[in-house]
């Protein structure tokens, strides 16, 4: 799931690997490869969100045995630049475009209207206009964060944690809430300080935020950015624990590492493209839970006791089996307002509009 990214830059780099032009149906009938494009906000070497999506692209192309040829463009900011990239892909025969960045959606809607024969797959947004050639895919990556929260709740000594994010949009807040609820399920004294950097990729600010949180007594820090690498290295330098989102950084920060959330985009991208090729694809919003296998817990750090590892793994297994419902009511927000009544749970619509945080989360005012 990628969200709105505000980047000021003088230029952007493109990497294209293009073949011959085609129409989707004709391509399939003539055994020509279907051209699939990926537009990415950051670099594929970020060891985070964009790398995970590019790994999915590579899996897609390899697993389709010549039926698919992929194209990607990296470090593409939102706005007119993204639109031009999509138009260039389409001009060179691309018929399916994945846009795993929250802030691309407005541009996607514009380009999709001009090209009704091209299918667009947008992550984590709502297709309110019901465009016939736009699909939404939304893996629930907040679910592993609940189990990661259990690890954090067991490992903290100060009961103070930090959560650094780029922007406090709904799916991000769902991650913050799930992590906090997981931590509080084993350690009710836990508090989580939320810090927004207003950018998905600003290493100096991320490092400074980590340092400030550590100096305030926080001893576990989570980060939801393009990559957790900067925050995790700063946490290790400050001699506190870290939990990463999008990638496993155990090798990079072995002394600080607790666990994290990782992606498995490849099978999902293959499933979507296969449905497009066989004609079963529909312009709908598809939500994928932990049981679908596209999100999981990362490895555990050496500091995490075997008993805690088992507790976290057991909880994640119960989430996949739907024996644990993270957002089962009653749940109030940090201001005491009832958000999810008893007997109810947060459905997809609720998560799409989650603009509030649970008690124990500091630094954000529920709206």
Image: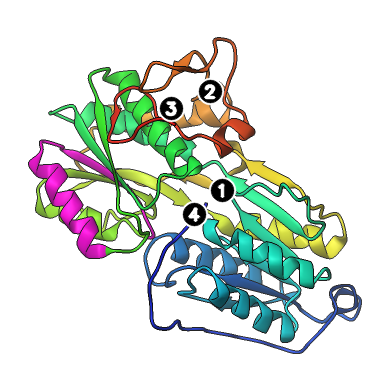
Q: At 27% across and 35% down in the image, what residue appears?
A: 363
Find the residue positioned furthest to the top: 342
Pick whichever, 56 or 189, lies toward us: 189
Q: Is 237 above or below relative to 31?
A: above
Residue 180 visible in the snapshot:
yes
Q: CA distance from mark 1 to mark 4?
A: 18 Å
Q: At 90% across and 78% down in the image, what residue appears?
A: 26
Q: Nearer the viewer, mark 1 or mark 4?
A: 4
Pick whichever, 235 or 203, lies toward us: 203
Q: At 78% across and 50% down in the image, what residue appears?
A: 130
CB atoms of marks 1 and 4 within 8 Å: no
Residue 255 visible in the snapshot:
no
Q: Quadrant of residue 172?
A: top left
Q: Nearer the viewer, mark 2 or mark 1?
A: 2
Q: CA distance from mark 2 to mark 1?
A: 18 Å
Within 10 angstroms of label 1, few (less than 14), some, or many (20 or more) residues? some
Q: Is 47 above or below relative to 237?
A: below
Which residue is label 4 attached to? 3
Q: Quadrant of residue 253?
A: bottom left
CB atoms of marks 2 and 4 within 8 Å: no
Residue 367, position in %: x, y?
44, 31
Q: Nearer the viewer, mark 3 or mark 4?
A: 4
Q: Is 343 above or below relative to 335?
A: above
Q: Name the element at disc 2.
A: loop
Q: CA distance from mark 3 to mark 2?
A: 14 Å
Q: Earlier in the sequence, mark 1 or mark 4?
A: 4
24 left or right, relative to 363 = right
Which residue is label 2 attached to? 325
Which residue is label 3 attached to? 314
CB atoms of marks 2 and 1 within 8 Å: no
């Amino acid at each position: 799931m990628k969200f709105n990214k505000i980047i000021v830059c003088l230029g952007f780099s493109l990497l294209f690997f293009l073949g011959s032009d085609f129409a989707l149906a004709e391509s399939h009938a003539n055994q020509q490869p279907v051209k699939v494009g990926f537009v990415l906000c950051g670099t594929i070497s970020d060891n985070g969100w964009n790398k995970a999506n590019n790994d999915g692209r590579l899996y897609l192309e390899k697993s389709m045995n010549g039926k698919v040829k992929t194209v990607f463009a990296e470090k593409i900011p939102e706005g007119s630049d993204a639109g031009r990239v999509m138009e260039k892909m389409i001009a060179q025969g691309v018929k399916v475009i994945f846009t795993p960045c929250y802030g691309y959606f407005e541009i996607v809607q514009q380009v999709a209207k001009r090209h009704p024969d091209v299918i667009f797959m947008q992550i984590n947004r709502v297709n309110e206009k019901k465009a016939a050639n736009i699909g939404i895919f939304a893996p629930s990556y907040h679910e592993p964060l609940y189990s990661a929260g259990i690890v954090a709740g067991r490992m903290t000594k100060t009961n103070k944690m930090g959560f650094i994010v780029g922007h406090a949009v709904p799916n991000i807040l769902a991650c913050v809430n799930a992590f906090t609820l997981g931590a509080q399920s084993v350690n009710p004294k836990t508090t989580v300080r939320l810090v927004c950097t207003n950018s998905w990729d600003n290493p100096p600010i991320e490092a400074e935020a980590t340092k400030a949180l550590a100096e305030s007594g926080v001893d576990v820090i989570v980060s939801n950015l393009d990559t957790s690498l900067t925050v995790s290295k700063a946490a290790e330098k400050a001699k506190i624990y870290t939990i990463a989102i999008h990638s496993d950084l155990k090798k990079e920060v072995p002394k600080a590492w607790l666990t994290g959330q990782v992606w498995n985009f490849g099978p999902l991208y293959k499933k979507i493209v296969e449905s497009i090729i066989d004609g079963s694809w529909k312009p709908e919003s598809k939500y994928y839970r932990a049981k679908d296998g596209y999100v999981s817990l990362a490895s555990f750090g050496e500091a995490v006791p075997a008993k805690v590892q088992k507790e976290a793994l057991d909880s994640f297994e119960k989430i996949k089996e739907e024996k644990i419902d993270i957002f089962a009511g009653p749940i109030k927000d940090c201001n005491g307002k009832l958000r999810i009544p008893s007997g109810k749970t947060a459905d997809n619509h609720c998560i799409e509009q989650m603009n509030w945080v649970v008690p124990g989360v500091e630094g954000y005012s529920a709206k």
